[in-house]
Image (spheres, rainbow, N blue to C red):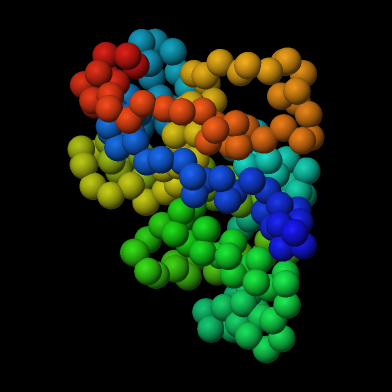
Amino acid sequence: MRSSIFFYSGYGDMPYLLDIKMDKHLFRALTQFWNPAYSCFAFRGVDMVPTVVEYMALLHCSKIQVDKAYSRAVNVPTFLKKLMNITGMTHPNTKKKVDVFALSVYGLIVFPKVLGHVDEAVTDLFDQLDKRVTPVPTILAKTFRSLNECQRTGKGRFIGCVQLLLAWFYSHFWKVDRVSYWVFSENYSPLKEIVAIPRRDDISEEKWMAIL
C-alpha cells in the first residue's frame, strides 16, 4: 500500500501503460497518416496531434512535476553514479524500490532502446524528476522524431512509447459511459478507463486504413 502511494504520487498512472495491448495493425495504419512536414496526423482533412496537456492528463500527472520541462544538464553525474542514486544501492528504502520499478517502466516502455538495456538518457532524465520537472515534452519529442523516421523509411522500429500513443488515439474515439464532470475529477484516471475497455484485436491494417 505504501509503495503504491509513493508510486502514484511521484509518477502518476504510468503503470497502466503495461496493460495496454500493442495493436500493431492500428499502429502501422496510424503511421501512414502522419504528416512529417506539419508534425501531425491528417485524417481526411482533420489534423490531430498529441499535446503536452493531453499526455499529462492521460498520465494523470497534471499536478505533479509541472514546474518546468526537462532539459539535459550541462554537468551530469556519471552513468554509474546516477544509477546508484536512483536505485539507492547504499541505503535502499521503500521509495528507492518504487524508483527502480519506475525506472524499468521508463526504460522499457516509455523510452525503449534495446531489449534488456536502459538508455543513459533515461537515467539522466530520471535523475532530475525529483526536481519537479515534467518528462512529457521529452516523451512527445521522442514520439514525433520516431514517427518522422517511420514515415521516411516506410518501416523500422518505433523508438517511443507506442502504448501512450495508442491510448491518446483511443481517448479521441471512445464513448465515456460516465457523467461528464467525472472526467475532470482528480480521482478520474483516463488510462485506467482505457485499459478496462475490451478491444478487438482482429482488425487488419487495411481495415484500419479504411476506418481512419
Is residue 10 in view from this perspective? no
Left or right of 81 on screen, residue 27: left
* Residue reaching furthest to the top: 45
Q: Quadrant of the C terminus?
A: top left
Q: Is residue 68 above or below residue 60?
A: below
Res 148 → quadrant: top left
Name the one closer to the observer, 87 or 80: 87
Q: Look at 68% across and 73% down and name the residue there.
A: 96
Q: Is residue 4 above or below residue 127?
A: above
Q: Please provide percent x and percent y for residue 82.
A: 59, 78
Name the one closer to the observer, 174 or 71: 174
Left or right of 163 on screen, residue 12: right
Q: Quadrant of the N terminus?
A: bottom right
Q: Please provide percent x and percent y for residue 210.
A: 27, 14
* Residue reaching furthest to the bottom: 90
Q: Look at 54% across and 25% down and name the residue there.
A: 171
Is residue 198 in view from this perspective? yes
Q: Look at 25% across and 18% down and name the residue there.
A: 207
**Count of marks placed on residues:** 0
Name the one closer to the observer, 212 or 128: 212
Q: Please provide percent x and percent y for residue 11.
A: 67, 54
Q: Please provide percent x and percent y for residue 147.
A: 36, 39
Q: Is residue 57 above or below residue 104?
A: above
Q: Look at 60% across and 82% down and name the residue there.
A: 84
